[in-house]
């Protein structure tokens, strides 16, 4: 879905999961395509940085990746 690849490490995982969970809670439409399916997959993939990287590639666009990367690197 996106053209930007984010690389989440195991040390980034708690911040990344927190950011994604906040987005799901705040925006019923997030991410923009199939948010229900994206949330179900997130719940299955959130325990591993490798899996979460795959999830991000599938569900987030470049802008969403950039915002998440900014959040987890701060």
Image (spheres, grey):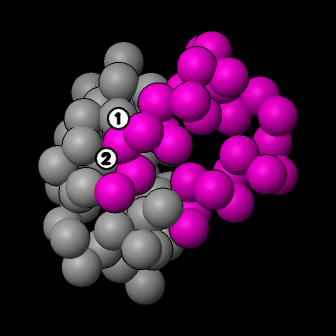
Q: Is residue 29 left or right of residue 62?
A: right
Q: Residue at x 24, y 79 (%)?
A: 11
Residue 48 appears in the figure: yes
Q: Is residue 27 left or right of residue 70?
A: right
Q: Residue at x 77, y 28 (%)?
A: 29
- Rendered-image quadrant of the N terminus: top left
In the image, residue 40 sits, relative to residue 23, either above or below, namely above
Q: Is residue 2 left or right of residue 61?
A: left
Neighbor class of circle 2 (other Cα within 10 Å; few <14, some 14-19, many 20+) is: many
Residue 5 in picture, x, y percent from top left: 21, 40
In the image, residue 29 sits, relative to residue 65, either above or below, namely above
Q: Is residue 40 magenta?
A: yes
In the image, residue 27 sits, relative to residue 7, either above or below, namely above
In the image, residue 22 sits, relative to residue 5, either above or below, namely below
Q: Which residue is mark 2?
A: 52
Q: Give the magenta-colored segment's residue range.
A: 18-47
- Number of marks in the image? 2
Q: Residue at x 56, y 54 (%)?
A: 20
Q: Residue at x 40, y 52 (%)?
A: 46
Residue 69 in picture, x, y percent from top left: 38, 62
Prevailing SS of the magenta stretch: helix
SS at mark 2 in the image: helix
Q: Is residue 11 left or right of residue 60?
A: left
Q: Which residue is mark 1?
A: 55
Tell whether label 2 touches label 1 (CB within 8 Å). yes
Measure the alpha-carbon separation of dots 1 and 2.
5 Å
Residue 15 in picture, x, y percent from top left: 45, 74
Considering depth in this image, is 5 or 51 the residue closer to the camera? 51
Name which quarter of the figure residue 44 lies in. top left
Q: Is residue 54 magenta?
A: no
């Amino acid at each position: 879905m996106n053209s930007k690849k984010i690389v989440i490490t195991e040390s980034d995982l708690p911040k990344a999961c927190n950011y994604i969970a906040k987005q799901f809670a705040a925006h019923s439409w997030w991410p923009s395509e199939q948010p229900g399916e994206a949330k179900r997959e997130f719940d299955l993939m959130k325990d591993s940085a490798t899996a979460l990287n795959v999830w991000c590639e599938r569900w987030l666009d470049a802008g969403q990746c950039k915002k998440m990367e900014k959040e987890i690197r701060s």
